[in-house]
Image (spheres, rainbow, N blue to C red):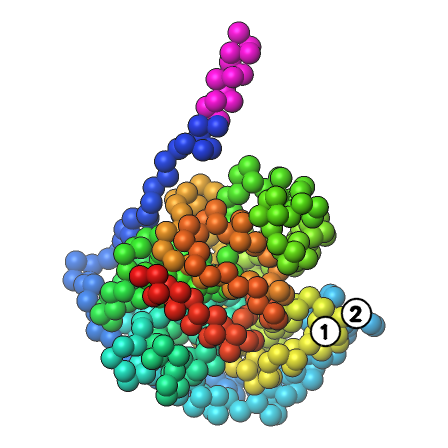
Amino acid sequence: MLLIIFTLAVGALLYYVFMRKNPQSIPEGDGWWGEGDRRASEVDDEPIEPFKIEVSEQMIQDLHSRLDNTRFTPSLEGSSFHYGFNSTYLRKLVAYWRNNYDWQKQVEHLNSFPHYRTKIEGIQVHFIHVKPGVRAARPLMMIHGWPGSFYEFYKVIAQLMEPGAQLGGFEVVCPSIPGYGFSEAPHRPGFNSLAAARVFHKLMRRLGLERFYVHGGDWGSLIATNMAQMNPENVKGIHLNFFPVSRLGLQLLPSVILGPYLPSLVGFTRTDVERMFPFVKNIYTMLRESGYMHIQGTKPDTVGSALNDSPVGLAAYILEKFSSWTSLGFQDLEDGGLDRKFSLDELLTNVMIYWVTGSITSSMRMYKENLGVNLMSRIDAKVGVHVPAGLAAFPNELMHVPLAWAKQKYKRIVSYSYMSRGGHFAAFEEPQMIVDDLVRFVQCVEKSD
């Protein structure tokens, strides 16, 4: 009898794992994130208004006062960036910020692309919308993550907009995720990546763009993935430089055990092995580097209160990620290697977008909204991505996902690229590489149509 019960149980498990039918798409649904209850007069065809970034002189004077009165904590001798942002270098950064950084010059640069805002589901959504002036331009949405912003894509947009750009040019829509930068923060709990995907679909429809590509990194990659799952008929393809896969099932254990010794048996390449193993060491690195995620995934408003009150604390918290997520080796340097890949003006402009909008707390809530539930039980975890996908694997990304694993989620991978250099902030760090890989992906998609 026990044997029969055991056999039936194993059979049921195998049927559940291999034969169950998962849905093929996610319902779009609807939502409301404005203040108070949705009124009957609220409509879905709100006007699109031009928007210009402007900051009062009073806010800048307040910033300078706070910078002048910063209380620094001495760093440990020889600690470099291993304890977080090195205070010795932080003093130098603050001195540059206070005395040399030209915010007005950066505002002019930020306003060099046309900005707009429109109300969707009760909140103002900010976005850049640029057109190359050719009829054959391909619509492309580019979505940032944390602690980045729409500014990450400025160099990429510039290249896509150059005369004679690749493939005849792209019509680029680059939004700020609600709660980030100049997009209004949701006024009630629950705004996760699925809600962002729905809002961005509505934005593209409002712009009259029915078929488009989406590029994303960090949270932008999950939002792009959700957009493809939600309305696959509207998304021609998604291009990602960050693509963790949460549901590997029975494939995980043999991959980890056999991968270093018989990589081809589990679908790994030598590059996969070099980037993934020793596996336990890489897991430890992930745990060490993800403390912020546990805080933001549980109590974001607590640390947000401190960061929103201190520009130096905000800069240290954000820019420490631009050090370690660009290269873990930068932790051995007193300056965190920050100027190896970026200019101080670029880094401080990204920080300033958070500071002048007071959006650090609302931006961190994205972790609470997504990680505060069992991700495995969400509908998007059970739905594959059936639109064409292009994946760019950068070597300094904290988590390497081999093609064999990515296939479990992305069912039509038309390009998978092992990038030769670069880390988490790929578009900001290596814009030419992103543009080239994106163009190759689009070419592959359109050749197969």
Residue 165 seen in render: yes
Magenta: main secondary structure: helix
Position in image of residue 13 (x %, y %): 48, 26
Residue for point 69% across, 84% down: 92
The residue closer to the viewer here, 390 or 124, is 390
Is 159 within the magenta? no
Q: Is residue 300 left or right of residue 191?
A: right
Element type where label 2 sits in the image:
loop
| Amino acid type, callout 2 | Ser
What's the mark number on residue 86?
Answer: 1
Position in image of residue 274 (x %, y %): 68, 57
Residue for point 48% across, 84% down: 59
The part of the image, by quadrant, that contains residue 82 is bottom right
Residue for point 50% across, 52% down: 406
| Amino acid type, callout 1 | Asn
Q: Is residue 203 left or right of residue 99?
A: left
Mark found first going from the N terminus, 1 or 2: 2
Residue for point 48% across, 49% down: 407
Residue projecting furthest to the right: 77
The part of the image, by quadrant, that contains residue 85 is bottom right
Residue 295 seen in render: no
Element type where label 1 sits in the image:
loop
Is 4 within the magenta? yes
Residue on which the image places disc 2: 79
Q: Are marks 1 and 2 in contact (CB under 8 Å)?
A: yes
CA distance separating discs 1 and 2: 8 Å
What's the mark number on residue 379?
Answer: none
Per the rendered image, the range of residues in magenta is 1-13
The residue closer to the viewer here, 133 or 224, is 133
Quadrant of the frame with the C terminus = bottom left
Q: Residues within 10 Å of mark 1 (few under 14, many from 20)?
A: many
Q: Residues within 10 Å of mark 2 (few under 14, many from 20)?
A: some
